[in-house]
Structure formats: C-alpha cells, structure tokens
Amino acid sequence: MEVKVATRKVDRYLKIHSLETKWKKAVSLFESNIRHPSLHTELMEPKEEMIYSFRVDRKYRALFVIRNNKAYVFRITNHYKK
C-alpha cells in the first residue's frame, strides 16, 4: 500500500525531530507489508473513526487513514508524551 503525506506539518515534524531516515525505512516496510512486525500497525480508539497508526521508531508513531487503497499520514506523534 502506498504512503502519502497528507499535510506539510508531517514533513516539518520529521525534519525538526531528525526522523527522515527512520521515516524512509518505516515507509519502505509499510509499503511492502502493512503488517510488518516492527511497525506495530494498529487501529486506534474509537475504532469507528478508522484511524490507524504505525511506528516510525520506539518513540514516534504515524497516524493515518486509508482512502482509495492509499495510506494518508496526517500526523506524527510522540507516543509517550504526557
């Protein structure tokens, strides 16, 4: 499944947090196998919203929706931020 970045904020966030290399690796894994074990892809709550996430690394996750057989990433989040 192809990954598309839905907003410029995603690109800026990746750059600010120096995640570009990890992002490229995660996208490559995702595009070859959406359920690759290292991605920990999951459907977020509430499930009816149909928002998913996958790991960029242990600290950051990409939030996305699936439309027309493409994954549109709309945010990168700090998974452990309180």
Image: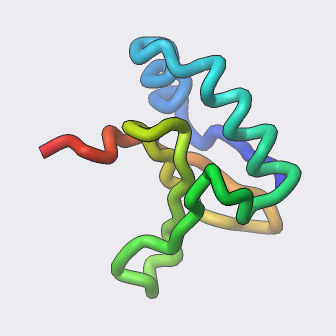
Residue under the point 61% across and 26% down: 22
Judge whether 27 appears above or below 25 on screen: below
Residue under the point 50% across and 22% down: 14
Quadrant in which the C terminus appears: top left
| In the image, farthest residue toward the front | 37
| In the image, farthest residue toward the right | 32
Judge whether 63 appears above or below 66 on screen: above
Q: How far across and how far down the image is residue 24, in percent?
A: 71, 28
Q: How far across and how far down the image is residue 10, in percent?
A: 50, 31
Judge whether 7 appears above or below 55 on screen: above
Front position in the image: 15 or 79: 79
Quadrant in which the N terminus appears: bottom right
Q: How many marks?
A: 0
| In the image, farthest residue toward the bottom | 48
Residue 45 figure quarter: bottom left
Residue 65 figure quarter: bottom right
Q: Is residue 10 left or right of residue 45?
A: right
Residue under the point 53% across and 68% down: 42
Q: How far across and how far down the image is residue 76, in percent?
A: 44, 39
